[in-house]
Amino acid sequence: MGLRERKKAATREAVHKAALNLAVEHGFEHLTVEAIADAAGISRRTFSNYFTAKEDAVLWGEEQHIKALVLAFRARPPHEGPWQALAGAVLDRFPTEEPPDRETAIRSRLALRHPTLLARQLANHAVLETDLREAITDRGGLTPLEAGCLGAAFLASIRLAMQRWVAGDEADDPRELIMETMGAMAGVFG
């Protein structure tokens, strides 16, 4: 990555962190694009080069995590069934030695409390659901409809596990909660 790309990535990260910090300090309902831009040391116009709205700035890291999960799924051994490969991708992406991500907890908590943020989060998941459906279909053995159902169930299991994690004051291991939720889904749909 060249210098320009690194600077853009650093600016995007600074804007995202400013948005999260301000949302925690003052409440999401009081968060403005102008306040985020000021806190990140950029202009309102520069903000719009990186994000279309305050919701995007707050949720930015979540999309990266899910895209990385899709890549981890694609890298799983071909002999694994799709649900097993999805579970393996979670284990690959969230090693036990890493502490739980505070930003993930903040984003999840904010989305649960603010309908506009939850709506944006669900819209982001719908786009990522398409990527996941394609990855599952490419693996073979399932029709696009079946792959779409599986991808939707997987993303729902992550969302439910994150809600449980946040509701439990983040005391549990989010990875274990995801595995438990995926196990419950497999049992229901088994």
Image (cartoon, grey):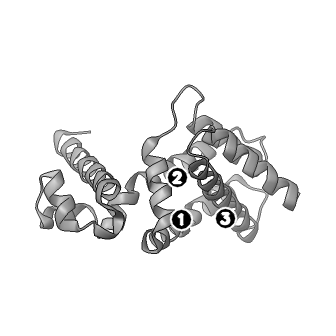
Using the image, determine if residue 190 lies above or below residue 97: below
With respect to residue 98, does 117 lie above or below?
below
Report helix, strand or loop for mark 2: helix
Q: Amino acid at mark 1?
A: His
Q: Quadrant of the C terminus?
A: bottom right
Residue 66 is tagged as: 2
Q: Quadrant of residue 140?
A: bottom right
Give the mark nearer the N terminus: 2 vs 3: 2
Residue 125's label in the rendered image is: 1
Q: Position of residue 149 (x, y in %)?
A: 72, 67
In primary-sequence order, the first of circles 1 and 2 is: 2
Q: Is label 2 in contact with label 3 (beta carbons under 8 Å)?
A: no
**Residue 126 shows in the view:** yes
Answer above or below: position of 5 versus 116. Answer: above
Helix, strand or loop for disc 3: helix
The image position of residue 56, as x and y in percent, is 35, 64
The quarter of the rendered structure image containing the N terminus is top left
Examine the image and state in which quarter residue 76 appears. Answer: top right
Is there CB contact under 8 Å for labels 1 and 3? Answer: no
* Side of 126 relative to 90 (left or right): left
Residue at the spot of label 3 = 152
Q: Is residue 64 visible?
A: no
Q: Is residue 164 above or below residue 55?
A: above
Viewer-proximal residue among 106 and 85: 106
- Residue drawn at the location 17% of the way across and 53% of the way down: 39
